[in-house]
Image (cartoon, rainbow, N blue to C red):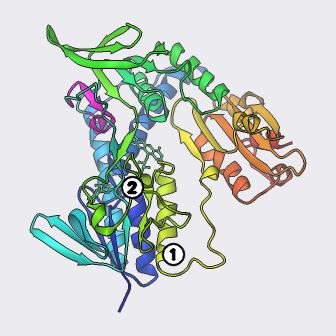
Amino acid sequence: MAHRFVIIGGGPAGNQAATYAARLGAKVTMVEREIVGGAAHLLDCIPSKTMIATGGAISFGQRIGGMGLTDASTTVDEDALVRRIGSIRDHMQDDTTQLLQSQGVDIIRGTARFTGPHSVEVDTADGVQQLEFDSALIATGTRPRIPEWCEPDHERILTTRDCYPPKVFPKKVTVIGSGVTGVEFVHMFASFGAEVTLVVSRQHVLPGKDPEAAAILEDDFLSRGVRLLKGARATSIERDPADPENVVVKCDDGRVVESTHAVLAIGSVPNTEMLNLEAAGVISDEGGYIPINHHCVTNQPHIYAAGDVSGKLPLSSVASVQGRKVAEHAMGLHTVEHRHLDYDKAASAIFTEPEIADVGLAEAEAFALGRKIRVTKVPFATTPKALINNDPRGFVKIVSDPATGVVLGGSIVGQHAAELISVIALAVTANLTVTDIVESLLVHPALAEALSQAAE
Ligand SMILES: Cc1cc2nc3c(=O)[nH]c(=O)nc-3n(C[C@H](O)[C@H](O)[C@H](O)COP(=O)(O)OP(=O)(O)OC[C@H]3O[C@@H](n4cnc5c(N)ncnc54)[C@H](O)[C@@H]3O)c2cc1C
């Protein structure tokens, strides 16, 4: 009998695991309660990048004066943009569904919970369905964290999930949280012409990221009129009883911000509390995340967890690769050539303007570890392509081992940073040296030339 593999959650982690396990001969059943393709993936990640792409077109339009043009429309057709977000989401959902079905994956629309170590039940529109499994994957993702001091009304006091597709394009908005999601929201709202205030609990945005990158981003925000409220923690967010259009954010240092909308971007919580994990004997940590080993196995050898719910890096890219690894392991392919995932080598990007991307060992981290490194930094302004593109902002920074030349990490700030970081990511994963990059015959004129120069 084929290996029965039940997957709870149809996001990047779940659908990659499903596709690969089915190809490897498993009888796969995937349960999804909301949207095939993943709630965080198709209702947050992709819509946010779609909005940001339109925001990028607006700012490009505002910069074209320097490119020999005199006019470009930067007027937003809000209805058209909302339709575009919906059509990209639907397209991706349909594609994912078709791919899964073409591999023979059985998709059940409903909410799953464990009933035993080898069984789940699924609440569907047509009643309860029982499933037995040999292996199972928990890939249920996360949802926005709501603090105890604030109750979103989902009209003007919003979570990140309430923003897509946008019901309104706020004209005056306060964003709480200056991590990756928070700064992307600030960038997006500012691109659409909103008056934006960012509540930053520390002295700088993007804690944990390259401080030089964060400084460039702060400069960009300030040049666009974004107000940065540094060293302030929001303590309450309420609608003004005297003016229903006014939202009042109070901070712990006494400062008060008034705007028409407020968005909470303060992290997420795992979707595990309704899974009845006890029935399967799966343990979660105190935050509700499910601890896993390097094969994504939970404390139960036949039950896996992958994606955001595993509490590793909350990225679609990481979730997908975890899903594939789970399928290989569940189907017995974790042989010698099975490489463990090294989360320290995951590339990530922040889709602001300029874009910020990094991978591997960061400069500050190396200093903290007392590790000897060589850091080389080249501004994009030295490349002809940046001048041609009329956008010389930013730099490429490569961190390497001074003794061997092996590339350990890097960060890029500037146009197409999210694409360009792939070169450094490959070098970090494959233990390539700076010489390998220098000797690669790259295109001219291209922004990638800054990579070669930084590797010299
Ligand atoms: C605003 C925002 C922007 C982001 N931008 C990026 C980005 O630019 N790049 C990037 O790599 N990542 C980005 N991410 C993160 C990315 O979306 C997640 O890391 C990714 O979607 C995680 O995949 P997943 O499979 O773990 O979860 P999800 O995509 O959330 O899928 C989990 C699925 O499980 C289902 N589910 C939950 N419980 C049950 C149950 N009991 N029964 C059945 N189904 C269930 C849910 O409905 C959901 O569809 C962003 C996230 C946010 C919030």
Q: Position of residue 188 (x, y in %)?
A: 42, 29
Q: Is residue 52 left or right of residue 366?
A: left
Name the residue tied to disc 2. Answer: 284
Q: Helix, strand, or loop for circle 1?
A: helix
Residue for point 75% across, 33% down: 384
**Residue 292 can be seen in this image:** yes
User: As shown in the figure, which amino acid type bears the numbered disc 2?
Assistant: Ser
Query: Looking at the image, how many numbered discs can be counted on the residues?
Result: 2
- Looking at the rendered image, the disc whose residue lies closer to the viewer, 2 or 1, is 2
**Within 10 angstroms of label 1, few (less than 14), some, or many (20 or more) residues?**
some
Name the residue tied to disc 1. Answer: 328
Residue for point 65% across, 26% down: 211
User: As shown in the figure, which amino acid type bears the numbered disc 1?
Assistant: Glu
Q: Is residue 199 left or right of residue 38?
A: right
Instruction: In this rendered view, identify the residue nearer to me: 354 or 121.
Output: 121
Q: Quadrant of the C terminus?
A: top right
Residue for point 86% across, 49% down: 405
Marking on residue 308: none
In terms of sequence position, does the residue under pointer 2 or pointer 1 come before the other? 2
Whether disc 2's CB lies below 8 Å from ligand 1 is answered: no
First to last magenta residue range: 154-166
Q: Quadrant of the N terminus?
A: bottom left
Tell me where residue 373 sits by quadrant: top right
**Residue 194 can be seen in this image:** no
Residue for point 34% across, 69% down: 7
**Within 10 angstroms of label 2, few (less than 14), some, or many (20 or more) residues?**
some
